[in-house]
Amino acid sequence: MDNVRILFEQRSPAAIQASQGWLDVPERRRVLLAGVLLGIAALSLAMGYVVAEEQLRLGLLLFLPLVAALLFLIANSRFDLLVLALPLMALTVPFDLPTGTESRVPIVLALTLALCGLWVLSMVIHQRWYLAPSPINRPLLLFGVACIISLVWGIIWRDPVLRMRALPNFSVVQIGSLLTYLASIGAALLIGNVARTEGRLKYLVGCFLFFGALMTGLQLLRIEHRIFTDSGLWGLWTVIPALGLLIAQPKLRWQWRLLLALLIAANLYQTMLVNTLWKSGWIPTLVAIFAATLLRSRRWFVVLLIAAAIVGYTQREFLNQMIAAELSEGADQRASLWETNLRVISEHWLFGTGPTGYAPYYMTYFRSDARSTHNNYLDIIAQFGIVGSALWLWLAFASTMEGIRLFRETQPGFLKTMALIATSGWIGAQASMFFGDWILPFAYNQTIAGYKYTVYSWLFLGTLISIRQIIRRRQGISPAQEAV
């Protein structure tokens, strides 16, 4: 029986009695089930009493555990479908959960954390700790551990003279930021362990193509909306899936190739020509296009380089105007921002200042210029130190090399195309980190609400884990034969 299916699926009590009988159920599960039933009965009796006494608030408080238990049972039985809902919710659900502060929690973040918690609980109950084998697992998990350690480290070694009053609820902000980082890692692992079929990977790509096309159309037509999440790297994850299918998917009908080419052209027109100054919105896409072309064909990569050189030469005036506009917007000040960040890092270099931890240092020592770095690489080293930064670079390198291996090992078909999409898109996402926090949202820039669009890259990173296990299953290699 499939280990992953055992991990995620629990049968109902009726099904257990029908197939095995009550006495055949493991003792631990019998005790757990009996406890749940007794708890529900006790809560029901207590709720009936307080409602009869017209204590409605207390009745509502008692009702919440019943609702939570019901949601737990539903989520446990349909775990895989809820995981596959993550890209849909990230792309289309504009609502956030209020927290009583200025920060709001995206529903997709809450769902990711709930699914991760349920996943861990399921492994505890089944006493089966399992991850689909992948070279990405170890750096992913170790980077998460470094994030947790950095929180404690940053608090222990925090300068006593910091103006913490200038940042109320700072501990809550730090914990919220840490949860977004851990949820990002969790999203990749969830997709990697649940998207176990080619059809589910096609669903993921289809979501980004369909809703990416809608976002592109709405922006081109200047139609205001509050429905779709067209922020962050939405352009990259619209163009690269389309490009991957266009250049790497065999036997694709010419009508679909034409539509994909039109989508790429429309999106690049919107992001590059209409929103020219927002370079973090289109430079990562260009990097990903070059990476995808190089993976697919060195000859076409040379052709693309020549074409880019010709365009750059003929559009020199336009490029000079764009650079001048960037300088007028203060782009030349970033070097001073990075210098300030490095001065903070020099005193907290091992595990950093913790999640968003350098903000109070800015408010205390650099009050006149307390601006964040707008550079995810510097953010990572400032928050998680040399250790966290080294682990991040390991993750970036290991995942890129894994994607290249998968692309080379896989026969022509959708899995090969998917490896091309995920790898080139991830390379483009790494390039985006030089321009902003589009991978790990900084609490005082994107806020934790930025998770809605930073999670895009993590979902596609998880597909590299999926592709590996699909290939191994087709080759007849069991998970037990590989190291996690």
Image (cartoon, helix red, strand yellow):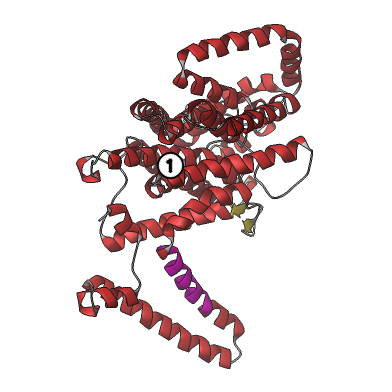
Q: Amino acid at mark 1?
A: Cys
- Please tell me how many numbered marks the rendered image carries: 1
- Residue 440 percent coordinates (x, y): 53, 38
Dividing the picture into quarters, in which one does residue 481 lie?
top left
Drawn side of residue 452 relative to residue 477, left or right: right
Viewer-nearest residue: 440 or 8? 8
Please tell me which residue is depicted at 67% across the width and 10% down the height of the picture. 312
Please tell me which residue is depicted at 61% across the width and 58% down the height of the picture. 99
Question: Mark 1 highlights which residue?
Answer: 147
Dividing the picture into quarters, in which one does residue 69 lie?
bottom left
**Which quadrant is home to the N terminus?**
bottom left
Q: Is residue 84 visible?
A: yes
Drawn side of residue 346 relative to residue 263, left or right: left
- Residue 319 percent coordinates (x, y): 71, 13
What predominant SS class does the magenta segment belong to?
A: helix
- Residue 274 percent coordinates (x, y): 75, 27
- Taking the magenta stretch, the answer to whether it contains residue 67 is yes
Viewer-nearest residue: 57 or 450? 450
Please tell me which residue is depicted at 25% across the width and 59% down the height of the picture. 127
Q: Residue furthest bottom?
A: 52
- Taking the magenta stretch, the answer to whether it contains residue 428 is no
Q: Which residues are magenta?
A: 63-76
